[in-house]
Image (tube, helix red, strand yellow):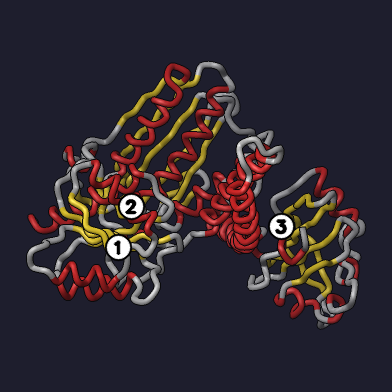
């Protein structure tokens, strides 16, 4: 892989370098060029040109030692452009590509290497590392997707021309299958890199419903292999959260817990929700919570636990202790999702006694009704207007919603949708629209629809990240979505509007 594809830290505010195992600097971001100057500007700059003799050994020696025994942060000294020598807390990430090793060195201010027990500093370091990984993942996923688009396009074209007995058909199908798997990985990277704070778009929700849904899914999937204990707070506080993302975070924690408990051969998992009220800032293991109200979901397993020296690193991007094809993004993804909702994730463990993960979300001290409509029944009789410029999406949404009792109207563009909304003989109970369409986009459609039908519930969808726009005030569904996700979000949006109307 080319260095320019791997390296995605050009806009980072801290110095970042891409180096070979021998200490050759392949890329330096603008922050590094500014701080270190001419030594990094030549044809083949060496890490040794900015390396302080106060460090132990050469750059190649350091990289070799780090590979044998990785550490979260290492204190190193470098020579600046003005001749001064300064200390940095260096975070290293190793990539293997085409039988070569690439090391990404992120040079954080030495102030971040504070004594262990300084929770705010530890959080700042983790945030810096996560920001680095987000930029890297975003760059890689974009390049990856461009390549996959070409591979899948050409492969599908050839498959369409190859008859059933063609000698190459089987190989082409394997290529298509592998490309589809690669697309899943690229989607993971995209999901990991999308950490915008979106909770203010969401209506107040009940975490009990999400936790129950996750447990039901895994209970059905794993049967008698795992013993489950589900304990839900009866009067759980309301919280604003992106349901799909929080469900993803809980799912990832439960997946890890099932895998860990399975190692012991007698898996036991407990999932509990509860209200938490703090009158002053409180420390829970690695998390410092401000005073206020929270809802907490705690997932506990009876697995072998996590070694004390590994526990501080579990949220680091690309760090994993698992064998096989694991990318180490799982808990980093959970951390990003929960902290961008204003909450925190605490992990505690004792070797041989399992792991407990606690997800905290800021809460509002009132209750959300858990009626049958919101909790389980996905059917409805309302009229839904579906707007999308892609015929496949229109047909899919119409088929699903009609099958569950809804009356569905479709429009292939915003102008057609406005014409339907203008008719007095066709009342619409929910507008479900794509955000990105040719001509008039979804955002303008939403504004004009609100003028035509004040108070109309609106659900929007997109394959892109929803922009942080408080004025939109709509429910949001990320593409691609499943039938269950669509039905649940439609039901939730309509029910929320009805609840507001009653109150």
What residue is rendered at 36% in x and 66% in y? 435
Determine which residue is flagged by label 2. 395
- Residue at screen point 87% across, 60% down: 55
Q: Look at the numbered disc 2 and give the secondary structure of its residue.
A: helix
**Residue at left offset 49%, top offset 59%:** 195
The reply to whether residue 325 is visible in this rendering is no
Q: Is residue 187 above or below residue 112?
A: above
Residue tagged 3: 91
The picture quadrant where one finds residue 28 is bottom right
Q: For numbered disc 3, what is the local secondary structure? A: strand
Few, some or many residues within 10 Å of mark 3 (<14, 14–19, 20+): many
Q: Which mark is residue 209?
A: none
Choose the circle earlier in sequence order: 1 or 3.
3
Name the N-terminal-most of marks 1 and 2: 1
Q: Residue 68: percent from the left, percent from the top?
A: 82, 43
Tell me, yes or no, if residue 207 can be seen here. Answer: yes
Q: Which residue is mark 1?
A: 387
């Amino acid at each position: 892989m080319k260095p320019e594809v791997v390296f995605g830290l050009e806009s980072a505010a801290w110095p970042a370098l891409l180096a070979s195992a021998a200490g050759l600097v392949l890329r330096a971001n603008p922050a590094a060029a500014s701080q270190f100057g001419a030594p990094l500007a030549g044809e083949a700059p060496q890490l040794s040109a900015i390396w302080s003799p106060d460090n132990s050994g050469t750059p190649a020696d350091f990289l070799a030692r780090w590979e044998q025994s990785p550490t979260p942060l290492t204190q190193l000294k470098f020579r600046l452009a003005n001749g001064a020598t300064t200390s940095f807390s260096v975070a290293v990430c190793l990539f293997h590509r085409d039988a070569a090793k690439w090391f990404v060195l992120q040079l954080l201010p030495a102030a971040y290497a504070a004594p262990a027990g300084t929770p705010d500093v530890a959080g700042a370091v983790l945030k810096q590392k996560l920001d680095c990984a987000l930029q890297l993942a975003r760059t890689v996923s974009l390049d990856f997707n461009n390549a996959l688009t070409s591979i899948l396009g050409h492969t599908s074209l050839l498959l369409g021309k190859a008859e059933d007995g063609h000698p190459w058909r089987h190989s082409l199908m394997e290529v298509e299958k592998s490309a589809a798997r690669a697309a899943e990985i690229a989607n993971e990277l995209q999901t990991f890199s999308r950490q915008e704070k979106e909770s203010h778009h969401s209506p107040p929700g009940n975490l009990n419903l999400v936790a129950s849904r996750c447990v039901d899914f895994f209970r059905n999937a794993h049967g008698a292999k795992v013993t489950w204990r589900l304990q839900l707070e009866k009067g759980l506080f309301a919280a604003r959260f992106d349901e799909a993302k929080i469900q993803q975070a809980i799912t990832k924690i439960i997946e890890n817990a099932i895998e860990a408990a399975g190692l012991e051969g007698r898996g036991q998992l407990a999932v509990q929700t509860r209200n938490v009220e703090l009158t002053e800032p409180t420390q829970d293991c690695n998390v410092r919570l401000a005073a206020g109200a929270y809802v907490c979901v705690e997932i506990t397993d009876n697995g072998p636990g996590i070694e004390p020296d590994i526990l501080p690193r579990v949220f680091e991007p690309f760090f994993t202790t698992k064998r096989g094809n694991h990318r180490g993004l799982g808990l980093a993804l959970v951390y990003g999702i929960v902290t961008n909702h204003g909450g925190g994730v605490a992990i505690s463990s004792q070797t041989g006694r399992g792991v407990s993960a606690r997800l905290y979300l800021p809460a509002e001290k009132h209750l959300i009704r858990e009626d049958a409509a919101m909790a389980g029944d996905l059917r409805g009789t309302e009229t839904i207007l579906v707007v999308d410029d892609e015929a496949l999406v229109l047909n899919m949404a119409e088929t699903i919603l009609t099958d569950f009792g809804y009356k569905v109207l479709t429009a292939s563009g915003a102008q057609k949708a406005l014409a339907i909304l203008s008719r007095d003989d066709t009342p619409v109970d929910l507008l479900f629209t794509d955000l990105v369409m040719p001509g008039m986009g979804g955002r303008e459609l939403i504004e004009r629809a609100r003028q035509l039908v004040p108070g109309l519930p609106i659900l929007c969808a997109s394959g892109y990240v929803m922009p942080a726009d408080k004025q939109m005030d709509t429910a949001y569904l990320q593409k691609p979505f499943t039938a269950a996700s669509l039905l649940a979000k439609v039901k939730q949006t309509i029910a929320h509007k009805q609840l507001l109307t009653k109150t």
